[in-house]
Image (cartoon, rainbow, N blue to C red):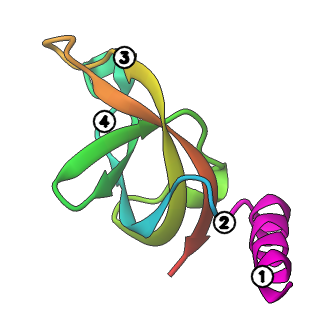
């Protein structure tokens, strides 16, 4: 009986807060330069990895801004830069300033 109750609470909390989806971590917002000038625009740096956010609210467009995020990989590649290699794209599920 208790086990069923515990499982029900866990699943309902995941749906309510989306806490079971994506990866939560500290990150840094970086300006990699204008796309028109062979940059990649606003990016999110997590450790040694750099990603392009599919959306980034204007309130977070500040170079070297320390943030806490939850994200998931979109499965897309954002093509940018002089070599056209680009960055993996992520969907930000949650973001807040540190």
For the magenta stretch, what is the residue range?
A: 1-19
Q: Residue at x 55, y 33 (%)?
A: 54
Q: Mark 3 points at which residue?
A: 36
Q: How far apart are marks 4 and 1 (CA)?
A: 49 Å
Instruction: Name which of mark 4 and mark 2 comes first in the sequence.
Output: 2
Disc sitting over residue 6 in the figure: 1
Mark 4 or mark 1: which comes first in sequence? 1
Q: Give the residue displayed 51% in from the left and 44% down from the top.
A: 72
Residue picked out by circle 2: 19
Q: Distance between the residues labelled 4 and 3?
A: 9 Å
Task: Say the numbered circle drawn on residue 33.
Answer: 4
Q: What element carries label 4?
A: loop
Residue at 30% from the left image edge and 18% from the top image edge: 80
Q: In what element is the residue under mark 3?
A: helix
The mark nearer the N terminus, 2 or 3, is: 2
* Element assignment for label 1: helix
Q: Can the viewer see residue 40 in this picture?
A: no
The mark found on residue 29 in the picture is: none
Q: Where is residue 69 in the image (x, y as percent from the top left)?
A: 52, 63
Question: Around disc 4, counting alpha carbons within 10 Å, would you say few (fewer than 14), some (14 to 19), or many (20 or more)?
Answer: some
Q: Distance between the residues labelled 3 and 1?
A: 52 Å
How many angstroms separate mark 4 from mark 2 (CA)? 32 Å
Q: In 3D space, how far apart are the residues under numbered discs 1 and 2 (Cα atoms)? A: 16 Å
Select label 1 or label 2 by which is in front.
1
Q: Which residue lies furthest to the front in this view?
A: 1
Q: Position of residue 85 (x, y in %)?
A: 19, 16
């Amino acid at each position: 009986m208790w086990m069923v109750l515990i499982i029900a609470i866990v699943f309902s909390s995941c749906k309510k807060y989306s806490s079971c989806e994506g990866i939560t971590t500290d990150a840094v917002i970086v300006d990699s330069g204008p796309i028109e000038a062979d940059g990649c625009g606003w990016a999110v740096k997590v450790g040694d990895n750099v990603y392009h956010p599919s959306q980034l609210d204007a309130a977070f467009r500040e170079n070297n801004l320390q943030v806490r995020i939850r994200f998931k990989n979109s499965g897309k590649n954002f093509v940018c830069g002089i070599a056209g290699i680009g960055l993996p794209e992520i969907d930000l599920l949650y973001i807040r300033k540190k």
